[in-house]
C-alpha cells in the first residue's frame, strides 16, 4: 500500500450537537483555496443528527476524518484531534463559525514568513445568533507588540477557531491541558507566547458567532474563572514556581463544569450574552438591539445594564 505524505495543514474541529451550524462550518474549510490539508473532526458524543451529517461528509471527501467518542468536553476532544494531526501546522475551526476561502492560504504564508512566529490569527467578524453583523475585532500587526499585548494585557486572538499554530510549538508548550475544561485556549496561547511570537493577518478571514446557548453564553462566568486560573499559572511560571496547586484547583473546577451549572446561573450567563449582542447592535444604530435587551431582562430581571439601555433608548 502506498503511504501518502502528510499534509502541511491539519484542521481540527470538535463538535457536540452542532447540527444547526455544522454544514456551513465544514463547507467553509472544504472550499479553501489552500488544498493541502486534512480535516480532523472529533464528535464529542453528539445525540442529534451530527453523527449522520459527519458520516455523509466523511464519505464524500477523503480529506475528512471523523473520530467518535463519548462526551468528555471540548478540551479532551481537542487533545485527541491534535494528537491525530499529521500536518506541520494545526489550524482550529469551531463548529458554529466559518472561515473565508483564503484563510488557510494566508495563514500558512504568514507562518512561512518567519520561523520565530509560532502561531497566527486574523481579524474576525463577530455576528449574532441570526448572522447580524456585530463588530470586527483585529489586533496589532507587529508580532512583537501583539505578543506583548497577549502576555501582559490579556489581548489574544479574537476567536479560538481563528488560530493556526506550528504543531512543533504546540507539542513543545504541552498542548491543551485537561485541567482546563474551559479557557483551554487562553491557557495554551500564553504558554506558546512564552516560546514564540504571535502574528495576525489584517484581513478578516474568520467569522465568530455569538449565541445565547453557546459555551460563552451559558457558561461565561465559569469560562472567566478558568481564564483567571490560566493567568495565575502564567504568573507562577514567571517566578519559576510550580503550577501544581493552581492546576489542582482547575481540576476541581472541572467537576463543577461536568455536572453543569444550576439553571439560574446559566440564565444569568445567557442574559449577559444577550446584553452584549444588544450593545454591539446599538453601537451600529441597529434597531434589532432592543429585542436583545428585552431578552436579557426576561432571562435575568436583575440585569440592570439591560434595563438602563431600555429606559434610555
Image: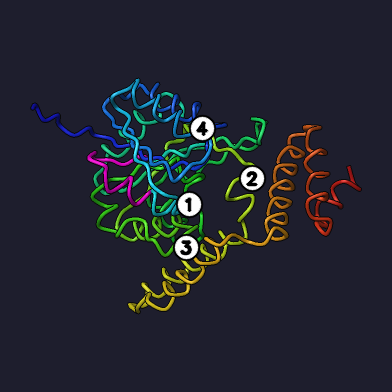
Q: Which residue is mark 3?
A: 152
Say which of 311 and 174 sits in front.
174
- Where residue 147 appears, as percent x and y from the top left, is 40, 54
Say which of 80 and 141 sits in front.
80
Give the SS element for disc 3. helix
User: Do the CB atoms of the residues marked 1 and 3 lie less than 8 Å apart?
Assistant: no
Give the SS element for disc 1. loop
Quadrant for the N terminus in the image: top left
- Label 4 crowd bin: few (<14), some (14–19), many (20+), radius 10 Å: few
In the rendered structure, the answer to whether residue 54 lies left or right of residue 182 reads: left
Residue at 45% across / 28% down in the picture?
53
- Label 3 crowd bin: few (<14), some (14–19), many (20+), radius 10 Å: few
Is the residue 299 above or below the residue 264 in the image?
Answer: above
Q: Nearer the observer, disc 1 or disc 3?
A: 1
Is the residue 193 above or below the residue 309 in the image?
Answer: below
Alpha carbon distance from label 3 to label 4? 43 Å
User: Do the CB atoms of the residues marked 4 and 1 lie less than 8 Å apart?
Assistant: no
In the rendered structure, the answer to whether residue 210 lies left or right of residue 23 reads: right
**Chosen colour scheme:** rainbow
Quarter-of-image position of residue 259: bottom right
Q: Which mark is residue 49?
A: 4
Q: Provide the residue span drawn in magenta.
A: 78-91
Alpha carbon distance from label 2 to label 4? 18 Å
Q: Which residue is mark 2?
A: 213
Q: Earlier in the sequence, mark 3 or mark 4?
A: 4
Q: Nearer the observer, disc 2 or disc 3?
A: 2
Q: Which mark is residue 156?
A: 1
User: Do the CB atoms of the residues marked 3 and 4 lie less than 8 Å apart?
Assistant: no
- Label 1 crowd bin: few (<14), some (14–19), many (20+), radius 10 Å: many
Q: Earlier in the sequence, mark 4 or mark 1?
A: 4
Amino acid at each position: 500500500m502506498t503511504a501518502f505524505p502528510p499534509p502541511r495543514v491539519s484542521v481540527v474541529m470538535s463538535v457536540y450537537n452542532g447540527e444547526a451550524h455544522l454544514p456551513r462550518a465544514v463547507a467553509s474549510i472544504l472550499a479553501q483555496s489552500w488544498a493541502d490539508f486534512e480535516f480532523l473532526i472529533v464528535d464529542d458524543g453528539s445525540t442529534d443528527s451530527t453523527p449522520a451529517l459527519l458520516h455523509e461528509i466523511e464519505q464524500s471527501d477523503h480529506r475528512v476524518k471523523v473520530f467518535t467518542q463519548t462526551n468528555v468536553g471540548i478540551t479532551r476532544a481537542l487533545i485527541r484531534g491534535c494528537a491525530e494531526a499529521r500536518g506541520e501546522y494545526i489550524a482550529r475551526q469551531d463548529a458554529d463559525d466559518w472561515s473565508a476561502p483564503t484563510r488557510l492560504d494566508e495563514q500558512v504564508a504568514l507562518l512561512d514568513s518567519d520561523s520565530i512566529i509560532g502561531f497566527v490569527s486574523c481579524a474576525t467578524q463577530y455576528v449574532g445568533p441570526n448572522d447580524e453583523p456585530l463588530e470586527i475585532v483585529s489586533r496589532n500587526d507587529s508580532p512583537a507588540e501583539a505578543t506583548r499585548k497577549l502576555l501582559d494585557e490579556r489581548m489574544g486572538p479574537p476567536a479560538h477557531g481563528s488560530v493556526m499554530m506550528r504543531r512543533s510549538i504546540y507539542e513543545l508548550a504541552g498542548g491543551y491541558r485537561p485541567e482546563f475544561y474551559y479557557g483551554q485556549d487562553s491557557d495554551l496561547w500564553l504558554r506558546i507566547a512564552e516560546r514564540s511570537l504571535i502574528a495576525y493577518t489584517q484581513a478578516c478571514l474568520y467569522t465568530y458567532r455569538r449565541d445565547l446557548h453557546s459555551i460563552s453564553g451559558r457558561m461565561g462566568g465559569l469560562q472567566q474563572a478558568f481564564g483567571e486560573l490560566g493567568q495565575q499559572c502564567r504568573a507562577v511560571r514567571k517566578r519559576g514556581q510550580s503550577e501544581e496547586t493552581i492546576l489542582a484547583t482547575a481540576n476541581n473546577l472541572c467537576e463543577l463544569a461536568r455536572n453543569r451549572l444550576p439553571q439560574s446561573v446559566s440564565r444569568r450567563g445567557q442574559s449577559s450574552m444577550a446584553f452584549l449582542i444588544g450593545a454591539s447592535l446599538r453601537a451600529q444604530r441597529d434597531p434589532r438591539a432592543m429585542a436583545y435587551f428585552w431578552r436579557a431582562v426576561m432571562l435575568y430581571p436583575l440585569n440592570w445594564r439591560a434595563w438602563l439601555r431600555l429606559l434610555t433608548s
